[in-house]
Image (tube, rainbow, N blue to C red):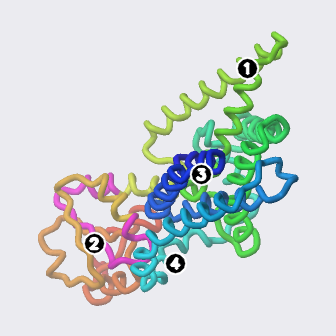
Amino acid sequence: MASSAAFLDAMRLRRIGNWALYAITLAIGINTHLFFSFVVITHAAYFLLTFLPQSGVQGTNGRTQVAYFFANLVGMLTFMPWVIFTTPYLNAASQNTSWTTFAVPLTYLVRLWAARYSGVFVDFDLLPIYSQILFVVPVLLLMFYSFIWMWQNGSPSARLFVILLTIIPVSILLIPDLLFDGIRSTVARYLVPVFISMQLAMAFLLSSKLKENVRWKRTIWQLVTAIIIMLGLVSSIHAVQAIAWWDKGSDYGFHEAATAVNAAEKPLVIVGRFHGDLFGATLALANELEPHVYMLWTTTVESEEMYGYDQVFLFRPTPLLQQSIEVSNEKRLQPVVQNLLWRVVENEN
């Protein structure tokens, strides 16, 4: 928001100080969130479209073009140390995000889109189909109408910017999902710019409609606004009190796993060495574990390391770790939480 506000101010006022502020926001944004690049691309598209008379936006002069170029150059240069540092770890980064490439049925993907985008305003977890028709569909229709209203009634600069801030990130994420499989277009942290544009469009629609001259129309839109706010508050309270939420995947299993481990008197949780998203999953589990729980990170485990504990658990073990337990230590694994947690028990043979 700050970077976009600085960008629009710099485009409108055309002062060096405004462009300097924009360069600072670019540097902060790109160094705090990699997908801030969607915002940078949106700014670039907006800047280029100002050259077209059809855009309805005031064009830029040579001084503005130079200022825009140098502001982006400064922002990108501040990111170069991260580029140099992370380049050797690109394979690890690819493994950590491999879950975004999982193939899912198109019907399920559509359902995720509906829940994700309507959830900006109303989110009651991943509801059954009949509940989605009741809550999700009306919100999506209202959201779609808000963009139409903005395009028809907003100022040329406002409508162009909001539409670009929606279309560009969604297109970058959606096209690979449709062509190569994946769920990139449903991940909340990738869609922050889109959520902002949706809120701006909805705010413009409601604020405009609340000024209707016809009383009965104004009353209807007052009621719509009240319902949106009320449902948003209720769903937010529900989400805060919930153990886990639909968009956190295996978080439901984490709570069940932590409960099983905490119930033991002196438990040991063995975690395999870093692979995929194991580090983040382990942090999520550890957040719910009690102080009496011991944790061990290792690739293989010896029998001596399991002595002194009344129960030993494996959390998302690697095949090598499973083999170490079952073959080297002559133990067997008893599932506790499907695909998440196993209990190490004596082999009955």
- Is 130 in the magenta? no
Q: Residue furthest left?
A: 308
Element on which disc 4 rests: helix
The relative height of residue 307 versus residue 197 in the rendered view (above or below) is: below
Report the side of 130 relative to 127 (left or right): right
Q: Amino acid at mark 4?
A: Ser
Point out which mark residue 270 bears: 2
**Mark toward the start of the polypeptide (3 vs 2):** 3
Q: Amino acid at mark 3?
A: Phe
Point out which mark residue 7 bears: 3
Q: Quadrant of the C terminus?
A: bottom left
Q: Amino acid at mark 2?
A: Ile
**Mark toward the start of the polypeptide (1 vs 4):** 4
Which residue is at a point 65% across and 50% down the rendered structure image? Answer: 11
Task: List x then y, in percent, for residue 28.
Answer: 44, 58
Element on which disc 1 rests: loop
Q: Amino acid at mark 1?
A: Leu
Bin the neighbour count of mark 2 within 10 Å (Cα to Cα): few under 14, some 14-19, many 20 and up. many
Q: Kindly report which numbered mark, 3 or 1, lies closer to the viewer in this rendering.
A: 3
Q: Where does the magenta region start and end? A: 258-280
**Mark toward the start of the polypeptide (4 vs 2):** 4
Q: Kindly report which numbered mark, 4 or 2, lies closer to the viewer in this rendering.
A: 4
